[in-house]
Image (cartoon, rainbow, N blue to C red):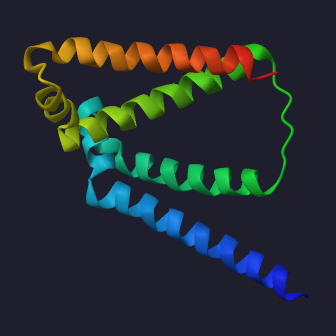
Amino acid sequence: MTISIIIVIFLGFAGGVSVGAGFVAFLTVLGIIPRLTQLSKTMKMIHHYEWAVVIGAVAGTSASLQDPRLYFPGFILVLFGLAGGIFVGMVAAALTEVLNVLPLLAKRLGIDGKIVVLLMAIVFGKVFGSLFHWMYFVD
């Protein structure tokens, strides 16, 4: 093996370890999963959430190292997208709840009484950005 291949392997491993450590710190220190179970009123299923995150991380890592081709009908892909969107939205809501981001942001912008407007701007921006991405960049 040449030295450049060894360096690439080392950098890939170091990057993976740093991203993994950040992900674990994000979930653990901020208490995202317990807060997510509180918001959804499913505290009894916290172990299922934890295992879903672990299995999802391992499956995502495995899929990114390979180039899988999955041929599913469109309605199945819609269900996968819906499930992924719900998960990301719930994690974002839990993170916002934990950090109290919106009240701080509203106070800094000077719109204390308009938190609903700020929230709707974020939601519509995310929706329109996602639609734009899917309509123009995804085959």
- Where, by quadrant of the figure, is residue 40 drawn? top left
Q: State left or right for residue 130 relative to residue 1.
A: left
Residue appearing at x 72%, y 57% in the figure? 62
Residue at the farthest front position: 109
Seen in the picture, residue 29 relative to 92 is either above or below; the reply is below
In the rendered image, which quarter contains the N terminus? bottom right
- 26 or 130: nearer the eye? 130
Residue appearing at x 36%, y 55% in the figure? 27
* Residue 37 in view here: no
- Residue 124: x and y, percent? 42, 12
Residue at the farthest right position: 1
* Residue 55 in view here: yes
Residue appearing at x 63%, y 27% in the figure? 80
- Where, by quadrant of the figure, is residue 130 drawn? top right
- 44 or 97: nearer the eye? 97
Q: State left or right for residue 133 relative to residue 116.
A: right
Seen in the picture, residue 98 relative to 21 is either above or below; the reply is above
- 91 or 138: nearer the eye? 138
Seen in the picture, residue 7 relative to 84 is either above or below; the reply is below
In the rendered image, which quarter contains the C terminus? top right
Q: How many labels does the image show?
A: 0
Residue appearing at x 14%, y 32% in the figure? 108
- Residue 6: x and y, percent? 79, 84
- Residue 95: x and y, percent? 30, 41
- Residue 9: x and y, percent? 75, 77
